[in-house]
Image: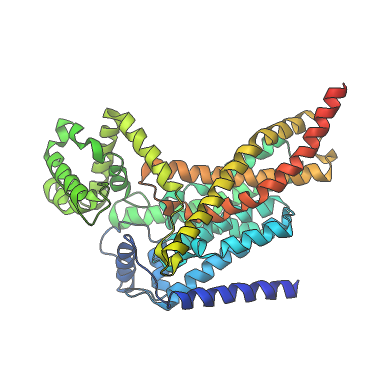
């Protein structure tokens, strides 16, 4: 055990050193990086004078790592360690589910490959969010499998914190226990597992609800905004940019402003010609025209966008479907290619392979899993099940939990934002785990199903 732990620590340490050197100890910037750094700088200089556009989780992390206003090697190394920690948290679960050595090797090799690590080099939320998501999912799954309360504590902490880092995941604390309880009822698990599931759900709620409520209370008391982030008005504007001409008369004062900025964004030679970022450029003029700021302007934009969605529901649906494509895109940047376009293409292929394998595994397992669980419901008590049946139930429960959490993220992200692939990255390790567990789970399901089919044929 000690040797194994030392080997893993040595491997993860070597990978941290490799990537830190490969990226010259320099974090990379993306479109949202400046906003997070500005909030972190305000925190470093004594506090916030106005409602921040984003939640405080990641800016507080930047402040604590001394990364404001100029992030350096400390941030890069810290985020690399966070990624290695997320990978390490998945390993006990894979061992608990009796994943083969080949499956474990594939998981680790892919999880430590550049396209799955590169997000740690950006001044963005993904590394911190990923650690919280993995702790929440893997910790809860380990608790259900009979492991110690430390895993439940890690799950509760991860699910409580993730909402103040990335608001789209703010309801994971509710989704994960509901998924677990649902599966337990469907599969008619034994009383011990059911009680652990109920206790885990109550524990997660007891930790997460006060954490999120305190953040909402802080914003309400300090800035008069009862929410986590005032970004909903802006992100919904991504969904309605093509139908601004349909704004009702009550929004006539701002319609011309919005259309002008949208058209300018579409024609900007430095843009992607999608017209999505127009709303942020229009904010100063909107504030001047409406006299609204911060939370009040966000509320105004939410109502305006809901009016547009009601007037053009199919255009909104089209934008949601488009966002779904972006959410599931491989999304590899030049950081992974280390200056090589060919290598970047290879890494895009690897990411695509994982996503396709995940989709195929979940599709192929759906039918046999449903038949197997239906058989469990019609059989005897849970205590009389064979060891193979218990192992399959545990695997299917984890796959159901992971698939449900990914489905929640997909639904919320595509419905409320432009849903770039970055929002999927925190779930990449659970997706990869499903992909490597899929083939062996399918083979295990075949045996009892074929046996039942033969018995039925004889009868």
Q: Is residue 455 above or below residue 270?
A: above
Say which residue appears at 25% left-offset and 54% top-offset.
Answer: 271
* Residue lying at the far top of the rendered structure: 459
Q: Position of residue 148 (x, y in %)?
A: 71, 59
Is 454 displayed left or right of 441 in the figure? right
Q: Residue furthest right?
A: 458
In the depicted view, which residue is nearer to us: 392 or 275? 275
Q: Residue 148, can we see it?
A: no
Can residue 32 be seen by looking at this rendering? yes
Q: Looking at this view, is 338 or 293 the one in front?
A: 338
Instruction: Quadrant for the N terminus, please.
Output: bottom right
Residue 111 x %, y %: 57, 61
- Which residue sits at x=39%, y=47%? 419
On screen, residue 283 above or below 344: above
Q: Residue 121, how many percent across, how many down?
A: 43, 68
Q: Is residue 118 above or below residue 242?
A: below
From the viewer's perspective, is 378 left or right of 68? right
Foreground: 205 or 297? 297
List x then y, in percent, for residue 153.
Answer: 61, 59
Rendering quarter of residue 106: bottom right
Q: Quadrant of residue 320?
A: top left
Instruction: Name the quadrant of the C terminus.
Output: top right
């Amino acid at each position: 055990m000690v040797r194994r732990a030392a080997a893993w620590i040595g491997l993860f340490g070597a990978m941290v050193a490799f990537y830190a050197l490969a990226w010259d100890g320099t974090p990379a910037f993306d479109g949202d990086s400046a906003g997070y750094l500005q909030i972190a700088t305000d925190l470093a200089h004594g506090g916030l004078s106005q409602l921040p556009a984003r939640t405080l989780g990641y800016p507080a992390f930047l402040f604590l790592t001394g990364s404001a206003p100029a992030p350096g090697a400390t941030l890069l190394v810290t985020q690399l360690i966070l990624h290695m920690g997320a990978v390490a948290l998945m390993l006990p679960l894979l061992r608990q589910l009796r994943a083969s050595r080949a499956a474990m090797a594939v998981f680790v090799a892919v999880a430590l490959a550049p396209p799955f690590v590169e997000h740690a080099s950006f001044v963005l939320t993904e590394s911190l969010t990923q650690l919280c998501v993995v702790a929440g999912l893997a910790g809860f799954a380990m608790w259900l499998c009979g492991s110690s309360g430390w895993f439940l504590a890690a799950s509760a902490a991860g699910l409580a914190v993730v909402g103040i880092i990335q608001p789209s995941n703010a309801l994971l604390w509710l989704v994960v226990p509901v998924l677990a309880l649902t599966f337990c009822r469907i599969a008619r698990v034994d009383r011990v597992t059911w009680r652990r599931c109920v206790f885990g759900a109550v524990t997660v709620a007891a930790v997460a609800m006060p954490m999120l409520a305190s953040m909402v209370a802080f914003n309400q008391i300090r800035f008069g905004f009862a929410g986590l982030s005032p970004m909903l008005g802006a992100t919904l504007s991504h969904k309605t940019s093509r139908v601004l001409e349909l704004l009702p008369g009550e929004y006539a004062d701002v319609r011309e402003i919005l259309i002008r900025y949208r058209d300018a964004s579409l024609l900007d030679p430095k843009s992607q010609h999608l017209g999505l970022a127009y709303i942020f450029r229009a904010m100063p003029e909107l504030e001047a025209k409406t006299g609204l700021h911060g939370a009040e302007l966000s509320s105004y934009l939410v109502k305006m966008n809901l009016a547009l969605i009601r007037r053009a529901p199919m255009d909104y649906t089209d934008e949601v479907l488009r966002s779904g494509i972006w959410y599931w895109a491989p999304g590899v940047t030049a950081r992974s290619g280390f200056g090589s376009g060919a290598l970047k293409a290879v890494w895009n292929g690897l990411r695509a392979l994982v996503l396709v394998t995940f989709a195929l595994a979940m599709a192929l397992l759906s039918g046999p899993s449903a038949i197997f669980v239906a058989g469990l419901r019609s059989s005897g008590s849970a205590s009389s099940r064979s060891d193979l049946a218990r192992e399959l139930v545990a695997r299917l429960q984890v796959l159901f939990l992971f698939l449900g959490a990914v489905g929640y993220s997909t639904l919320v992200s595509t419905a409320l934002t432009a849903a770039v692939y970055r929002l999927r990255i925190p779930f990449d390790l659970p997706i990869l785990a499903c992909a490597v567990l899929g083939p062996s789970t399918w083979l295990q399901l075949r045996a009892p199903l074929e046996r039942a089919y033969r018995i039925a044929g004889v009868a």
